[in-house]
Amino acid sequence: MKKILLSISILASVAYFSQEITLDKIYSGYYRGKGISGISSLKNGENYIVIEQGGIAKYSYKTTQKEGNIVDGNFESYIFNDDESKILLLKESEPIYRHSFLGKFDVKDLKSGKVLNLNNGNFVQEPTFSPDGSKVAFIANNNLFYQDLHSGKITQITTDGQKNSVLNGLADWVYEEEFGHAKLYEWTKNSDAIVFVKSNESEVPEMSIPIYGKQLYPSEMRFKYPKAGENNSVVSAQLYRLDSAKTIALNLSNFKNYYIPDVYKTAKADEIILITSERLQNASDVLKVNTKTGAITRLFTESDKRWIDTDNVTLEFLTDNSFIWGAERDGNRHLYWYDQNGKLKKQITKGDWEVTNYYGYNPKSQEVFIQTTQQGSINKVVSKVNINTGKTTLISNSTGTNSANFSQNYNYFIETSSSAAKPYTYVLKDGNGKTLKEVQNNEEQLKKLQQDNMVIKEFMTIPNEAGDQMNAWVMKPKDFDPNKKYPLFMFQYSGPGSQQVSNSWDQGNGLWFNHLVQKGYIIACVDGRGTGYKGTEYKKTTYLNLGKFEIDDQIAAAKWFGKQTYINKDRIGIFGWSYGGYMASLALTKGADVFKAGIAVAPVTNWRYYDSIYTERFMRTPQENPGGYDDNSPTSYANLLKGKYLLLHGTADDNVHFQNSMEFSEALIQNNKQFEFMAYPDKNHGIYGGQTRPQLYQKMTNFLLENL
C-alpha cells in the first residue's frame, strides 16, 4: 500500500511541475496574482489608505512608504466621514444578492479612540455617515434608521418594512441587479434630512427556489422577481426631516415616475437629486428636490429613441452647483456640463471615442479626469480634460487597460494597468502622468505562466455580413503550423454593451483557454453587434431583437474562421455563460450547420423568463413585442439541434432561473434530441463553492476532448 501511494505521489508531482498549464495548477492558486485592496486617498491628498492583514494602513504618496495603521485589526471594508475624524469598519458580512449584504459595523472616533457598535452590534445594510459626521443612517429589516454617534440613540424612521413586501431606502432584487446598487437613500448636505425610495413589492410575482442541502425535506428560497411584462414594485420618493421627525411623500405625478434608479445630494444644503424613468427606459428625468418645502423642479430630460443606460449614471456637482453629466447623444458616450438650473453650458468631451469611467474634477486646474477609448476600442486609457478649452492630455499608458485612483488634490494617482500579455501592475504617477514609482507588479505570476508555455492573444478584426469590422482575438498553440488543420473553440458573451475583446489581463477563463490551446485547440473570441465601446449605433442595433444579430455575427465569424487554411471547418465549437450561454444555445440550433459542439452555462433560453428592467430596456415588454421574444429563443429552434450540446446550470440561480434550462431541456427531449446536462445543487449563477469550479471545468474540458 505504501508503494502504491508513493507512486501516485511521484506521478502527481511530475504532473504538477510539468511545463504546462493544468487545471490542477489553475485551481490550486499556483498562478494567483497580487493586488492592492481598498485604495483611497485621504483629504490631504498626500496619503492613501489600503486594507491589509492586520489593519487599515496609511501610505505616503511621495515615498510610497507605510506610515502606520489608521486602525488595527482585520476588516472587510471601511468608510470615512467627511472630515475623516471617524471611520466605519465592516467586521463581518453575509451576502444576500449581487451587491447587497448584511454587515456588522463599528464606528471608531479616530480622535478619542472611542468605538461604537452600530445598531448594538446587530446586522445592518447600507450604513452612511451624515455629512456632518454626527450620525449614521442604516437599514435593518427593510426599515430605515439613524444612530446618533454621541449619545448612541437609535431613531427609527420607518416602521412598515417587511420582507417580500415593503423596502425603505433599499433596492429590491431587480433594482439591485439591473441598476447596479442596493442603496436608495441620501442625506442632504447639511445633514438635516434624508430622501429615500419606498418600494412596495407586494404585487410583484414571487419566485420560489428549492434548497436541498442535507435536510430531509428541502426548504425554499422565496423572493420577489418581476419577469418581463409582469408587475414591478410600486415606488415612491419620501422626504424625512430630522427636526420634525416626520416623513412626507414627494409628488412625482408630473414627472416620469415608474422607476427611481438613483438618489444624489448636490453641493448645496436642502437639495437632493432624483433620477426617474418610465418603464421603457428611453427617457429619464433629472429632478431637483427642495428638502425644506418638498417642491420638485425638473432640470432636464435625457431621452433616446431606443434606450438609456439607466444603470450607468455619471453625475457630479461642482462647488457652484453646476454639474457634469454623461450621455450618448452624439453617437458615443461623452460628458456634458450643466449650470445649477439644468441649462446646458457645453459638451466637455468630443470625438469618435467613449468616456468609459469618470474619476472626478479638479477645481484648481479646471480639469476632469476620465477613462476613455481614445487609443482604440480594445484599449482603456486615462486622460484629463480642461472643461473650458476641451484640451485633452493622456496621462496613463497609451495601450492596454488602465485605470486610476487619484489623490483628492489630483497631484498623484495610482495607475492599475494590464494587457493581454502582462498581468496587473500598480504604478504611482503624478497628476501629469509622470511615473514616480512602481508600487507592485506581478512578474512572479507572469514568469510561472511563461515557464508553462502561456500563449498570448492576437488581436484582429473580422467582417460580418453588414459590413462591420468586428473586434476579435485568437489564441494559437506555441508550435502553430499554418499548414495544419486545428479545431476551433469560440468563446463569447455578446450581451448589450459588453466587451470580451479587450487588451487586458484575462482573470476569468484565460488560463483555461491556455490549457485548451495546449491540448491542440485554437481559441477565438469575437465581439459582434450589440457589444460595447464601438459607438452607440453598433451597440444598439440589437434593439427589440436580442439574439438575432448577435448569433448572425457569431455564425459569420465561425464561417470566416472556417475558410482559413489552419481551421478545420467541421470542428468548430462555442462556449458561453449566462448571455453567452444563450448565444451558445442559439449557435447549436440556428447555427447547427456551422457548430459541431457547444457548451451553455446558466443560459437564458427565453427572454420571457428574465427580469423586467434588463429585458424591457432592450426588448420592450412581451405584450408589445412578442415576436422579438419568441423568434430569438433557442427553444423555438430545438428541432434544429445537430451537434453535441452540454448544458450546465445551478439549481439555486436567483438571476437566470433553473427554469430556463428545464424549458429548453423539455423542448429538446420532445424533439428527440440527445444532449448532456449537469445540474449543480444549491449553486447560484456563479456556480462555485468547494470543489464545484474544478469539477465544472474538468467536465467541460472532457466534453471538448471527446466531442471536438
Image (spheres, rainbow, N blue to C red):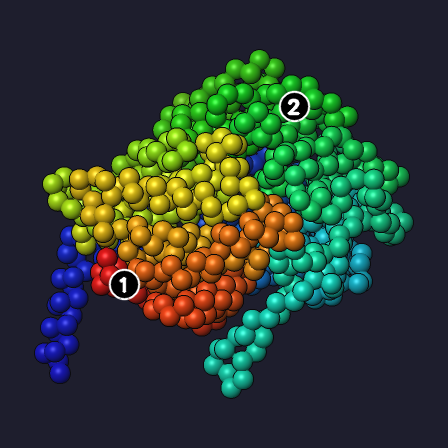
Q: Is residue 625 above or below residue 291?
A: below
Q: Residue at x 19, y 54 (%)?
A: 519
**Tag in front: 2 or 1:** 1
Residue under pointer 1: 703
Determine the secondary structure under disc 1. Answer: helix
Q: Amino acid at mark 2?
A: Trp
Q: Is residue 87 above or below residue 651?
A: above
**Which quarter shows the N terminus?**
bottom left
Query: Percent x, y for residue 131?
Result: 72, 41
Q: Is residue 448 left or right of residue 210?
A: left
Determine the secondary structure under disc 2. Answer: strand
Query: Percent x, y for residue 502?
Result: 38, 37
Q: Residues within 10 Å of mark 1 (few under 14, many from 20)?
A: some
Q: Name the residue nearer the viewer: 499 or 506.
A: 499
Q: Is residue 309 left or right of residue 539?
A: right
Q: Quadrant of residue 219?
A: bottom right
Q: Name the residue nearer the viewer: 339 or 404.
A: 339
Instruction: Give the number of the disc on residue 337.
Output: 2
